[in-house]
Image: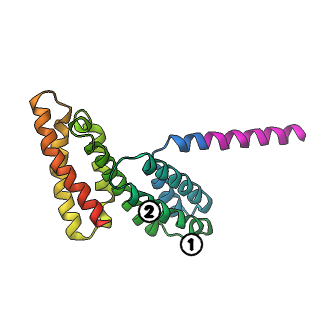
Amino acid sequence: MKRFLLSLTAALLLFAVTSNAIAQGLSVESLLDKAVSLTQKGDKAGTASALTDGVSALEKEAKSSNGSLKDKLLGKAGDLKNLIPLASSGKLSGGTLGKVVNAVKMLIGANRISGLLGKGDSGLLGNAASLTSSLGLIKAGSSVLGDANESKLNGLLGEATKSVSALDKKGPAAKLAAAASSKQLSSIVSLVGSAL
């Protein structure tokens, strides 16, 4: 019996360490998506755990960021932290959490873009994939905006996505793309910051 209990304890410890290591490898947005999914399935403990990990990852990213929306991200981390007790008690709806998560996604994407914009052309050139990913996050969360802002944002996102794709080119074409995308990306960061 003692061997069985020792084996069980070792297995549980290994599971806890492994799941924590896996959680650390997930992006902030993946952890928050996981929390929304678990809420919809009615998994109270899983939701609370994913939210706790998501808040921790969000705070870490915001504190290490040099983007202009850092303070707004920390504010949203506080909002999410306040939802953890509701998640634990099963009183948190997927719709409520989904709205906060969508706002967080937009802020994460805009803040990452802001950080790259702060480095000038060197932050943009060669970073098409990173910028496209951040634009995707903003698009994914845009349903929390009112119709007018969402429509305006979608127009800016379309233009920026085209410009950003040329940032991995070499020579004058890349410099032109950096100039064009810099204005569009700044407008997006500004719109997200003012809307949220």
Along the line of sight, which residue is nearer the eye, 127 or 65? Answer: 65
Does 52 sit left or right of 125 as displayed? Answer: right
What residue do we see at 27% from left, 40% from top? 119
Q: Is residue 6 left or right of residue 84?
A: right
Residue 2 on the magenta span: yes
Q: Which residue is mark 1?
A: 91
Give the image location of residue 181, x and y in percent.
Answer: 16, 45
Residue located 57% across and 65% down the image: 87
In the image, the segment drawn in magenta is 1-19
Residue 71, given in percent of the width and then of the height, sits at 40, 58
Q: Quadrant of the C terminus?
A: bottom left
Please rate how many residues cluster around mark 2, counting C-alpha atoms within 10 Å: few if below 14, some from 14 to 19, many from 20: some
162 relative to 126 in the view: left or right:
left
Q: Which mark is residue 75?
A: 2
Residue density around tag 1, few if under 14, some if 14–19, many if 20 or more, within 10 Å: some
Please name the predominant secondary structure of the magenta segment in the image.
helix
Mark 1 / mark 2, whichever is N-terminal? 2
Question: Is 142 rendered above or below residue 168?
Answer: below
